[in-house]
């Protein structure tokens, strides 16, 4: 979380974090290009976490970084586009953020479906992602209140669960 970040470059208006996490960035060249085209000239700022050299000439509304201090950055976002990795999803929901999910492998399709079933996001197919579909999904989660309301309900549930302190206490109680 000590990764440097240019906080002064955050713009007013909707902001969306776009990330494929730390396990899948090598699978993202087509995804990143699609995401850039989806948001080009749109009224949103994108903070895109992508490997260096993956995006050559991003438009002015896309800020590209190889790494970001995700936990510190999420409270400044309005939505998240990700691969449905468990950490990114939980951290996003802990911040009450609606999601657009493009699962790739492993448990990601299951996690994505759980978010969709809870009403906190939309799921798109990673391998068939088109710019227009991605923009439509981003626009929906930003401007349809039910997604944010569902994400806030999940945020409340996470907070009521007690976090890591409660988990430690429960584990110690098993000894």
Image: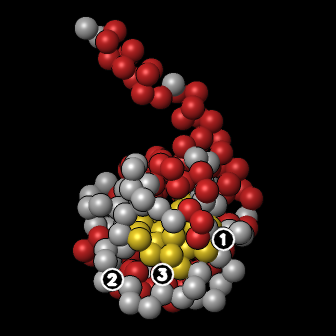
Q: In 3D space, how far apart are the residues under numbered discs 1 and 2 (Cα atoms)?
A: 23 Å
Viewer-side label of 2, 3: 2
Q: Which residue is mark 3?
A: 35
Looking at the image, do the residues carrying marks 1 and 2 touch, with CB atoms under 8 Å apart? no
Label 3: which secondary element: helix
Spot occupied by residue 79 in the image (x, y as percentages of width and height): 59, 62
- Can residue 155 be seen by looking at this rendering? yes
Q: The C terminus lies in which quarter of the figure?
A: top left
User: Which of the two residues, 138 or 7, is positioned nearer the viewer here?
Assistant: 7
Viewer-side label of 1, 2: 1
Q: Which residue is mark 1?
A: 11
Upstream in sequence: badge 2 or badge 3: 3
- The crowd level at tag 2 (other Cα within 10 Å; few <14, some 14-19, many 20+) is some
| Quarter of the view holding residue 138 | bottom right
- Is 7 above or below relative to 96? below
**Which residue is at a point 73% across and 64% down the rendered structure image?**
144
Q: Which residue is mark 2?
A: 54
């Amino acid at each position: 979380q000590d990764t440097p970040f240019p906080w002064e470059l955050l713009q007013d208006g909707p902001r969306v974090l776009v990330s494929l996490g730390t396990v899948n960035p090598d699978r993202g060249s087509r995804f990143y290009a699609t995401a850039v085209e989806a948001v080009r000239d749109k009224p949103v700022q994108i903070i895109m976490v992508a490997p260096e050299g993956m995006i050559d000439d991003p438009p002015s509304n896309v800020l590209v970084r190889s790494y970001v201090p995700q936990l510190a950055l999420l409270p400044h976002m309005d939505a998240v586009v990700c691969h449905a990795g468990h950490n990114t999803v939980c951290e996003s929901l802990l911040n009450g953020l609606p999601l657009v999910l493009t699962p790739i492998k492993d448990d990601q399709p299951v996690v994505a479906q759980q978010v969709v079933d809870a009403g906190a996001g939309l799921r798109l197919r990673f391998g068939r992602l088109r710019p227009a579909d991605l923009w439509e999904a981003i626009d929906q989660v930003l401007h349809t209140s039910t997604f944010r309301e569902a994400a806030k309900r999940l945020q409340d549930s996470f907070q009521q669960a007690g976090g890591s302190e409660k988990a430690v206490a429960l584990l110690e109680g098993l000894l």
